Amino acid sequence: MKSRMGKVKLFLLFGITSLVLAACGKENLTSLDPKGYGAESSFNIMMLSLIIMIGVFLVVIVIYTLALIRFRQKKGQENYIPKQVEGNHKLEVLWTSIPILLVLILAIPTVISVFDLADETDASSSINIDVTGNQYWWNFDYTGEEIQTSQDLYIPVGEKVYLHVKSSDVVHSFWVPTISGKIDANPENTNTMYIEAYEEGVYWGKCAELCGPSHSLMDFKVIAVSPEKYEQWVADMQNADPEEVPAEAVAQEGKELFESKSCIACHAIGSSPNAVGPNLTNYANRTTVAGIKDVTKENLVEWLLDPESIKPGNLMTGNYPELTEDEANSIAEYLLQLDHSEVTPQSIGEW
Amino acid sequence: MSLASAQKKGFGAILWDYLTTVDHKKIGVMYIAAGAFFFILGGIESLVIRVQLMVPENDFVSAGLYNEMITMHGTTMIFFAAMPILLGFMNVAVPLQIGARDVAFPFLNALGFWLFLFGGILLNLSWIFGAPDAGWTAYPPLSTQSPGHGTDFYVMALQLSGAGTLMGGINFIVTIVTMRAPGMTYMRMPLFSWTTFVTSILILFAFPAFTVALFLLMFDRMFDSAFFDIALGGNAVIWQHLFWIFAHPEVYILILPAFGIFSEIFSVFSKKRLFGYTSMVFATFLIAFLGFMVWAHHMFTVGLGSVANAIFAVGTMAIAVPTGIKIFNWLATMWGGSIRISTAMLWALAFIPSFTIGGMTGVMLGAATADYQYHDTYFVVAHFHYVLVGGVVFGIMAGLHYWWPLMFRRVLNETLGKLAFWLFFIGFHLTFFIQHFLGLMGMPRRYWVFLEDQGLDLGNLVSTIGAFFMAAGAIVFVINIIYTAVKGEKAPQDPWNGRTLEWAVPSPTPFYNFKQLPLVRGLDPLWIEKMEGNGKLTAAEPLNDIHMPNGSIIPFVMTVGFFIASLGFIYQYEYPIAYLALYGGMAIGIGGMIVRSLKDDHGYYVRKEELEGEVE
């Protein structure tokens, strides 16, 4: 039995390890290929603890296997009575003190990095963004810049960006695995965390605290761009004119419907502080419709006609007058020409 | 009740017997049977979860139903499967192990069981009326805002069963302190009795925190208070503290009895005294003590600040030390022994590597900086299933095989037992090992769907396949139970060459356990008698009349009353007519308490003459 069990385990271990090595996950989602300061700090502690743990595990398994091989009852030994050992002082001291040492080796760097990641001394001279979690979308308010975005968070590469995270309803958790660990969005207080991306890219963000039926559909993006592009994006966003009349007739009609069908009551275009629903400035350059679907007119129309089928429990359903397919089409046409910035996510990377 | 209890009785008489019993052995068996039933329910819920996550963007269940599934799976498995089965083992084994005739408060014992059972029934009734959907952790504001009555069912069901558990905890503390047989000093107690003792202390201190939290949630939902309502000056994070001050020790409430079971099994099946007994006891206490010091490691991302995170990180890592002591002591118990691999031992052997992985990921999770990544992902799901399945469920399975002869006078079939083991063991690692990586690859827990093209497809598929292996293992085990009941051979009094007192009583165990209380001469008393005496325990007292408690229907009636009242509480804020159930139910429950308090019940005596007639 013991050799069979050993083989099964070995097989499992090899099978799963090779499987894992083949894919560390999606490049801009996984935490195993960190591309930001927080993710790197976490990864380093992860690897340190993993190495210690694998060492301990091997020691346990070696003793375990030897014991099973050497001391299995053999035929004819049924009446053999082994020596009844009470204990062994030296051994017990040994296997108490070595783990204490190992724990210390892990504890010291952990404590140092906990304080390092909570350091807020540079906050006043850095970019500060108020992040608000809502059922089921994220709002980003750039302090002092008069810029509001939702779902797509633009940050410059190589700079600490301070996020002041809170929630407008239930607890959410802000998580961009490749850039940084997570921080909860609580309704009662603001949590501050800084993120710093090392490379340009479009990174997936996820909500990591159960927040209702569409918890798993509350994805967002962090779009890390070069400092020059970031400056450009900020200028573009600040120049976005919510009153601008679209060139095409269908889109013009869409703009009118956007106002008459009370979309505008919740959704601002431009830097208005109204954040009942997601801000739609620069919508043409969104990475997704509703956080999860590709940006196509079909998807947007589908969303406008029946958001419940895409995000169960969302707060848009039932809060606007019914739309005909034509009307939804016009509104989609209008939203998809809101191209306010030259910095597009497509020019940064895939997602 | 007479001695001739082996006589054939009608169904009605048997039912009445179980409804009124205060016998710890029968209550133990009922705990295990009811726990097994809820285990099956929780298992079915887990299969629904795994089928939903088999492929990306699946629509096997709706988002709302999925959240109900995860909530019910967690709540059911922890409170209504694992805990009662372990309480069942405590009931079956502890009084026998310490040489007692029953627990200290047999009436309370019965009441505790019925409260647990009706709590479980109440929770599962919610499937008809809308189940809770805020996760087993029920964080407000999500839980206070959750529409329907699901969360009300969660609150009342856990309040009911929690009261029962608290009674069980108190009962075992008093039993172990006051009712040990002559010579059974604390440091001669079998390790399962020790872990029961420490677990009971944990229950005594941990459950009240949860009771308070549940009351606050109940008032917020039913009586318009605002403990968790931020708009009215409440605070929602306080729930997380109260919950985890309870729920972290709860993990140890589950794992310590399993440790006790493994300690018994390693010793018996290695034919060796437990290595480092004193340090094992010491380590158990240390784990329990530290278990109360680390709750905020579930809250590293809540924003408690770096000082709190650092302290709780180091505290959490410290638990690795006593746990490590235990693992090495078990290995040293096997070392130099004469190891027999029965099915019980097989589960115990599988526990060592599985639980070691779970313990190690626990230390990894304790490193707060790394936890910012792990928290609320499938890494955590993998970790606690390695602990709760690789530790607790393996312990329950080992315990079932080990004590089955004591409970049912049959030995479970070894071939079927080993088949079930391998299916379950392989399935378990298939299901959960990969989930560590799913979490690190960016899959948060409690996700109804995962999106396509995120590199999560293969891992989830493997995990689902593993879950079906586990289900197959569980089915084979059920077949084994049926097969053993029908065709199994009668078990001898001491089938495993046991070392502790429960194997010294005749089979079937008389309802008074010991005709004469045994004299205990050291650790592993039966083994000592086997080595030094004639294999029989010396009596510590002359044959005398035995004082036994009377059975009573009051615990059952009281529980039914509180159950009806719970339904009243759940519905009173919507339908005023439910007040009828509320007041009526409370009248029955409190009436039962009054009757019990005013009516003198001194129990009865089994006469010396009757006992002399019994053959051993």
Image: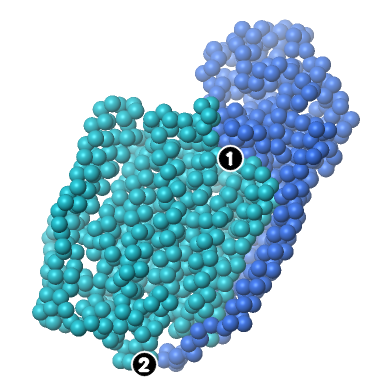
Chain colours: A blue, B cyan
Res A198 → quadrant: top right
Left or right of B275? Residue B114 is left
Q: Which mark is residue A209?
A: 1
Task: Kindly identify which residue carries mark 2.
Answer: B532
Res B319 → quadrant: bottom right
Instruction: Name the residue located 65 percent from the left edge and 69 percent from the top edge.
Output: A99
Find numbered disc 2 in the image and state the secondary structure of the residue it sits on. Answer: helix
Left or right of B65? Residue B430 is right
Q: Residue furthest left?
A: B609
Q: Chain of mark 1?
A: A
Q: Nearer the viewer, residue A280 or B364?
A: B364
Q: Chain of mark 2?
A: B
Q: Measured from the top left, where is residue B50 in percent x and y?
A: 51, 48
Q: Measured from the top left, where is residue B471 in percent x and y?
A: 44, 57
Residues packed near mark 1 inside 10 Å, few (<14), some (14 to 19) or many (20 plus): many
Q: Are marks 2 and 1 in contact (CB under 8 Å)?
A: no
Q: Amino acid at mark 1?
A: Glu
Instruction: Name the residue located 36 percent from the left edge and 78 percent from the top edge.
Output: B184
In what quadrant of the picture does the C terminus of chain A appear?
Answer: top right
